[in-house]
């Protein structure tokens, strides 16, 4: 087994949790750490993420849904998940755990506390999630994506640091590229994102809205739309019948390349989507998920709207006619799009991955130093691995 110091990532099963975990994992490996991932079955299914790193699947369930029987089953899964995660942490000789929220991250954080392993948490949204609120009090640090993140427990506020939300390297690289030129009569590329789970409302509204456009406007569009499997055929049919060039799929592994050439995005307002939009500098129409916990997607979206980079629709007002009117106006106004693109980029934190890695590295070094000072080894280890290479004097500025 490698003697590099091991850092374990614990992430929920959605893209909003997995994408920043992936970005951090890549950065930590570059700094000489061995990185492992613990998640549920959904989290381990994402293609192209954390390739080559050791991954472990545990049982997990949300105790806040599903009625009495569902909650009982979730509670049993949670207990099982804690024991499973404990076994993996010991086997991997994990020195530090980083939690990204979501109920699949909870068993690993609880197991880390049981073993006395220091842990950090990262919050992607503008409202601290339920799992992160539960464990924030014992965290070495609480990394935030927004300066005014709501519901941070008072006992954890002194350890809260604004790092931003890490994005994949390929997305971060788009910050160095210019917004693609667009004219009032040129090709207009639209990217429609429903999040990692797709979004029925976008499949219902967006194709119908673009089909309402005049013939000359429809011929300008090149659309890429992510949607649920059950919506694929009807969405394709709507675009085909409207003579709109469109590619529809459940998941696009080449999203960085597609985002590079996109002029405009129509999307939910999940944290990873917001972070990728700001990294790439792409204007957007945002449609927050109305049932999201604590309505965090609306709060996410408002931050970008107030910066001047996006337009907000709530679900009740997101109709084909209303969307068609907005998109047509924007497509005919390249100056407005260019201005919004610049505002979106200015709202981002391009150093988010580095800042979060600095924070995690401080926790790893501090935790090891405490063990050495006390003359003990972390539970489950037989020897102390060498300190990883790299600059250990990095500091994070809030």
Image (cartoon, grey):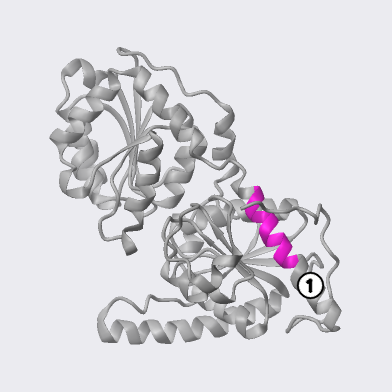
Q: Which residue is mark 1?
A: 368
User: Residues in magenta?
Assistant: 354-364
The residue carrying pointer 1 sits among few (fewer than 14), some (14 to 19) or many (20 or more) residues within 10 Å by Cα, namely many
Left or right of 302? Residue 78 is right
Residue 219 percent location from the top left of the image: 25, 19
Place residue 68 in its image quadrant.
bottom left
Q: Secondary structure at mark 1?
A: helix
Residue depicted at 45% across the width and 57% down the height: 149
Q: How many marks?
A: 1
- The secondary structure making up most of the magenta span is helix
Q: Quadrant of the N terminus?
A: bottom right
Place residue 387 in its image quadrant.
bottom right
Does 363 appear in magenta? yes
Relative to 195, residue 248 above or below: above
Residue 264 percent location from the top left of the image: 36, 30
Left or right of 341? Residue 122 is right
Residue depicted at 75% across the width and 60% down the height: 33
Most foreground residue, 124 or 102: 124
Examine the rendering and report whether any part of residue 383 can be seen.
no
Residue 310 percent location from the top left of the image: 35, 36
Residue depicted at 22% across the width and 32% down the height: 239
Most foreground residue, 196 or 98: 98
Examine the rendering and report whether any part of residue 158 can be seen.
yes
Does 68 appear in magenta? no
Relative to 295, residue 153 above or below: below
Residue 112 percent location from the top left of the image: 62, 78
């Amino acid at each position: 087994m490698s003697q590099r110091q091991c850092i374990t990532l614990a992430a929920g099963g959605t893209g909003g949790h997995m994408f920043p975990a992936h970005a951090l994992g890549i950065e930590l490996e570059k700094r000489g750490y061995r990185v492992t991932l613990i998640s549920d079955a959904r989290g381990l299914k994402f293609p192209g993420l954390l390739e080559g790193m050791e991954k472990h699947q545990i049982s997990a369930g949300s105790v806040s849904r599903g009625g009495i029987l569902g909650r009982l089953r979730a509670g049993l899964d949670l207990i099982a998940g804690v024991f499973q995660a404990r076994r993996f942490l010991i086997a991997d000789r994990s020195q530090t755990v980083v939690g990204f929220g979501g109920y699949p991250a909870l068993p690993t954080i609880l197991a880390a506390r049981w073993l006395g392993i220091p842990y950090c948490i990262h919050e992607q949204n503008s409202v601290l999630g339920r799992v992160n609120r539960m464990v924030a009090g014992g965290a070495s640090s609480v990394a935030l994506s927004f300066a005014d993140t709501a519901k941070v427990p008072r006992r954890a506020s002194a350890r809260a640091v604004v790092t931003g939300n890490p994005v994949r390297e390929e997305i971060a690289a788009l910050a160095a590229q210019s917004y693609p030129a667009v004219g009032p009569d040129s090709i207009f590329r639209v990217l429609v994102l429903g999040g990692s789970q797709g979004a029925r409302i976008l499949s219902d509204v967006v194709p119908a809205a673009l089909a309402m456009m005049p013939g000359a406007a429809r011929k300008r569009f090149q659309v890429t739309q992510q949607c649920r499997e059950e919506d694929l055929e009807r969405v394709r049919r709507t675009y085909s019948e409207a003579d709109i060039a469109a590619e529809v799929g459940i998941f696009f592994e080449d999203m960085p390349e597609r985002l590079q050439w996109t002029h405009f995005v129509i999307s939910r307002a999940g944290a990873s989507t917001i972070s990728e939009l700001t990294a790439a500098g792409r204007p957007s129409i945002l449609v927050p998920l109305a049932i999201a916990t604590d309505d965090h997607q609306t709060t996410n979206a408002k931050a970008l709207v107030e910066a001047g980079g996006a337009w907000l629709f709530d679900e009740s007002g997101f109709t084909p006619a209303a969307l068609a009117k907005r998109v047509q106006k924007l497509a005919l106004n390249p100056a407005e799009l260019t201005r919004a693109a610049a505002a979106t980029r200015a709202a981002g934190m391009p150093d988010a991955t580095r800042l979060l890695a600095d924070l995690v590295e401080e926790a790893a070094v501090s935790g090891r130093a405490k063990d050495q000072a006390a003359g003990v080894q972390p539970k489950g280890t037989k020897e102390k691995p060498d300190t990883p290479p790299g600059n250990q004097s990095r500091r994070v500025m809030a």
